[in-house]
Each structure stands twice: as structure tokens, then as C-alpha cells.
């Protein structure tokens, strides 16, 4: 199976890789002109790329006509995950990408144990983790990992762009199965999960005013790193994207 790389520099029958991916292909994989790789652009299409030129920090290709990736869910899911402590966000990102999340947006809320610290440097690492997971599991596009939102009010403001926003609340709420009982399903769904301490009552009220629907994940209390993955798996199962 050809190696998979992600690039935004693709179009008109040509493409290029730069930076670490170009170095990996040229120096680690020892690629040569004429070799082929699998290239994925931001349009969730997959292209067969044939190497035409190799420079120290750039590899150029001619590419075939793009074909839709069968690995991408039909429903675009954004995960708003309260910032956990002790590196657990890495686990959420890695496994979330494997399941099919389209975008991960961490945020700080009232009961978060973690506090903002060197977030730009962390975000670079989180993006690398997402890219590695996307390559490993065969995704057709590179999921995004955003810089964390500073408070829950910023989360509620962002939910205005979503067709359906689900707040996974330890106090329960609507039945997820009833909300996603039958197609047509929303094309964009936001999932909001809490921190170690869950959500404050006023945050739940704020989210409902912003249009979010509180839902539960069963009678057991899930850890903050478990709930996002359970929510993703449940929604993707109900929309048919894990079949």
C-alpha cells in the first residue's frame, strides 16, 4: 500500500510536499522520481501522486484525478472537549481522529483542573498527533486541532455555526437515540464534553440558551477522557458512519 501524506498544495494535476513530510519521503523512505504515494488534500479526495522532482525540503508530483475517500464520515463532527489534566488531551485527539472526528476544539471551563500554559507549543504537538493518527488509520483529510477557547462562553458563541449541538451532561437529558432516530441527519454536529469536575449548572443553562441539547451517556459516570470517545462512537454509530 502506498504511503499516505496530507498536503494543501494540490490542484491542476500537480501537488507538492514540504517540511517534515518532504524530508521523510526523500530521506527516510529514500523515494526516487517515478515512485508513487497516496496524497490527500483538504477536499477529502485521495490522489495517486507520482514523484517528478525531489529537493531537500520539497517533493513535487503529478497526480491522478481525485477520488472521494471512503474513510471520511458523512457527518462533520466537531468535538469541543474541556481541557483535561496530565496529557489526557493527547489520548482524546489520537483516538478521536481514529474514530472520525473532523475538528477538535479544547476549552477551559469552570471546573477544569488544568490551566493555560504554553498552549501554542502544545498545539503544535497536538496537530502532529492528529496527523500521525490520520495517516495510521487511513483518513482522507487531516482533522484540525484548534487552539483552546478561554472559557465556556466562547464555546457557546461557537455553537451558532453548528446544525446540531449536543452537550453531554452527567445530569442526563434527551435520548441520543431519539435525537438521531432516522435520516436525514445533520451534516454538522458539535459534541461538547466536560472536564474532571463536569459542568457547572450555570454552564448548562448557558449552553441551552445557545441552542445546545443536553444528552446523557447512560447511568455510569465516565471519565473526562472516556466521555468524548464514547460520545463520538455513539453519534457515528447512530448516523451510520461506523457501519
Image: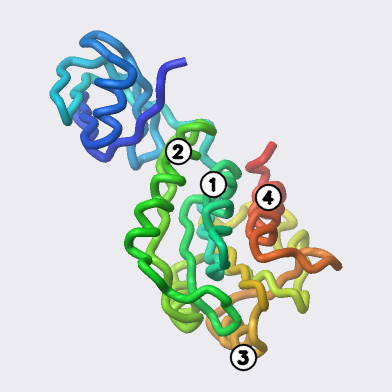
Residue at the spot 64% in from the left edge and 80% down from the top edge: 199
Q: Which residue is mark 2?
A: 132
* Callouts 1 and 4 close, C-beta under 8 Å: no
Residue at the spot 39% in from the left edge and 33% down from the top edge: 45
Q: Earlier in the sequence, mark 1 or mark 3?
A: 1
- Residue 40 rendering spot, x and y as whole percentages: 36, 32
Q: Which residue is mark 4?
A: 233
Q: Nearer the viewer, residue 187 or 110?
A: 110
- Residue 73 rendering spot, x and y as whole percentages: 55, 43
Circle 1: is it few (<14), some (14-19), or many (20+) Cα within 10 Å?
many
Q: Quadrant of the C terminus?
A: top right
Left or right: residue 210 versus residue 65 is: right
- Residue 51 rendering spot, x and y as whole percentages: 23, 16
Q: Where 163 sits versus 71, above or below?
A: below
* Callouts 1 and 3 close, C-beta under 8 Å: no
Residue at the spot 51% in from the left edge and 59% down from the top edge: 78
Left or right: residue 4 versus residue 14 is: right
Q: Nearer the viewer, residue 97 or 48?
A: 97
Q: Earlier in the sequence, mark 2 or mark 4?
A: 2
Q: Secondary structure at mark 1?
A: helix
Q: Which residue is mark 3?
A: 202
- CA gap between label 1 and label 2 equals 8 Å
Q: Which residue is mark 1?
A: 94
* Callouts 1 and 2 close, C-beta under 8 Å: yes
Residue farthest top in this picture: 34
Q: Nearer the viewer, mark 1 or mark 4?
A: 1
- Residue 149 rendering spot, x and y as whole percentages: 42, 73
* Callouts 4 and 3 close, C-beta under 8 Å: no
Q: Earlier in the sequence, mark 1 or mark 2?
A: 1
Q: Secondary structure at mark 4?
A: helix
- CA gap between label 2 and label 3 equals 38 Å
Amino acid at each position: 500500500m502506498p504511503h499516505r501524506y496530507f498536503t494543501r498544495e494540490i490542484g491542476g494535476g500537480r501537488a507538492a510536499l514540504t517540511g517534515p513530510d518532504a524530508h521523510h519521503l526523500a530521506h527516510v523512505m529514500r523515494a526516487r522520481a517515478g515512485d508513487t504515494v497516496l496524497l490527500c488534500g483538504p477536499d477529502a479526495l485521495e490522489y495517486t501522486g507520482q514523484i517528478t522532482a525531489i529537493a531537500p525540503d520539497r517533493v513535487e508530483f503529478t497526480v491522478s484525478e481525485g477520488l472521494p475517500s471512503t474513510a471520511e464520515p458523512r457527518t462533520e463532527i466537531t468535538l469541543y472537549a474541556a481541557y483535561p489534566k496530565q496529557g489526557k488531551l493527547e489520548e482524546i485527539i489520537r483516538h478521536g481522529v481514529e474514530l472520525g472526528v473532523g475538528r477538535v476544539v479544547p476549552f477551559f471551563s469552570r471546573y477544569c483542573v488544568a490551566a493555560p500554559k504554553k498552549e501554542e507549543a502544545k498545539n503544535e504537538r497536538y496537530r502532529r498527533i492528529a496527523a500521525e493518527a490520520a495517516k495510521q488509520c487511513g483518513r482522507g483529510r487531516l482533522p484540525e486541532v484548534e487552539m483552546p477557547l478561554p472559557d465556556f462562553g466562547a464555546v457557546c458563541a461557537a455553537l451558532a455555526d453548528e446544525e446540531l449541538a449536543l452537550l453531554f451532561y452527567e445530569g442526563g437529558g434527551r435520548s441520543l437515540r431519539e435525537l438521531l432516530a432516522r435520516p436525514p441527519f445533520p451534516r454538522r454536529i458539535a459534541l461538547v464534553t466536560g472536564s474532571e469536575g463536569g459542568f457547572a449548572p450555570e454552564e448548562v443553562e448557558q449552553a441551552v440558551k445557545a441552542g445546545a441539547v443536553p444528552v446523557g451517556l447512560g447511568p455510569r459516570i465516565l471519565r473526562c477522557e472516556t466521555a468524548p470517545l464514547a460520545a463520538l462512537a455513539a453519534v457515528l454509530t447512530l448516523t451510520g458512519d461506523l457501519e
